[in-house]
Amino acid sequence: MKKRRKNDEKEIYSSHLNRLTIFLFVIGSVGAADKPILKIGYSDWPGWVAWEIGIQKGWFKEAGVDARFFWYDYVTSMNDFAGKKLDAVCMTNIDALVTGASGRHGKAVVINDYSNGSDMVVARAGIENVKALKGKTIALEVGLLEQLLLRKALEKNGMTEADVTVLNLPTDKLPLALKAKKADAIVAWQPSSGNALNSSPGSKAVFTSADVPGLIYDVLFVSDESLEAHAGEWEKIVRVWFRIADFIKDSENRGEVLKIMSERVGVSPAEYEPMLEGAFLLGSEGNKKAFKVGEGLDSIYGSTKIADQFNVDIKNYTSPQDVNTYIYPDFTM
């Protein structure tokens, strides 16, 4: 009888253990099921390629957020966001307004960078400055931010678009257009601007976004519905971004940074280094400064007001937008 009692005790203990295991599994499963999967589109721009560092180093998992990043061509990423295939997308403040005005509103929850030279007006050999472009043909993708950069370049040199001929081409076709002499200059961002310089001997950048810092802010743009439902999760993602920015800015990590980012876009670290320099990354302090309300380009509010006027002028949409509704500084300020 004593032996039987021992066996009974073992069976009872085993039964309780199994039940406890099942209970913990069910609780864990419910928790996993309740955790939202946040789908983010990102594309080939240094401030967005930088997300790859957080992805590869497992920092999103460490933060307890299920962020799924999907690699895109830029325009396609915006279209898929508008079509509700993504919860968020990496885009410029200029294009965010167009997306919101045309159907899917959202908010910039973190500023990855401002363009600091990677957006360029690249002129063919023999053209030394913007003034020399008067009467010439300039190719760009009409309606996108590069048209605003061209306008600023012309404005600073006493001209308007009426003083040049604008040729509308897809951004990825611009380097070939310059090489084939279909245009005297092109306006593009990296990697297309760099490809144009490399493929057209004697070409040079006669104006860049470094001449107008803050004209183009690159942001993580989250849909209103996802931000409202999962604000806590998005805040975790913003915190990971600040960790990424700090990691990149630490010179001791330079080799690892260039390796990770260059592999994402399929070039060598040496080729990628100047591209990274063309975007001024903003960490926590940089975001605090840029998220302050102001009228100048040092504020995303002032920059986005300029972008809004540009979008109305070229008929990207008809009615001015309330830019304040596109900006969400709560995770930073």
Image (cartoon, helix red, strand yellow):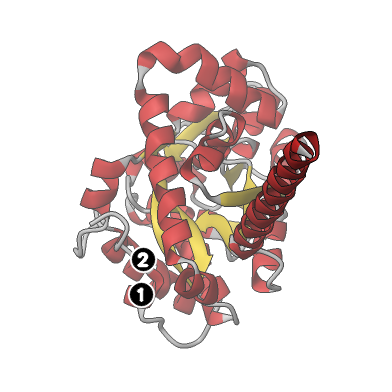
Quadrant for the N terminus in the image: top right
Return the residue nearer the eye: 307 or 53. Answer: 53
| Residue 151 is at least partly visible in this image | no
Classify residue 212 as left or right of residue 229. Answer: left
Question: Could you say where residue 134 lies in the image, as x and y percent from the top left?
Answer: 49, 50
Q: Identify the image quadrant of residue 30.
A: bottom right
Count neighbours of disc 2 (C-alpha within 10 A) and say few if under 14, some if 14 to 19, many if 20 or more.
Answer: many
Image quarter of the C terminus: bottom left
Please, what secondary structure does the residue beneath circle 2 have?
helix
Given the current orientation, which residue lies at the most extreme bottom position? 319
Relative to the observer, which residue lies in front, 277 or 111? 111
Residue linked to disc 1: 323
- Real-space Cα distance between discs 1 and 2? 7 Å
Where does residue 142 sit, x and y in percent of width and height? 62, 62
Q: Residue at x 40, y 71 (%)?
A: 326
Q: At label 1, which amino acid type do we have?
A: Val
Q: Is residue 267 visible?
A: yes
Image marks 1 and 2: residues in contact by CB distance under 8 Å: yes
* Residue 182 vertical position relative to residue 293 in the rendered view, above or below: above
- Residue shown at 63%/52% (left/top)? 24
Badge 2 is on which residue? Answer: 304
- Label 1, secondary structure: give it: helix
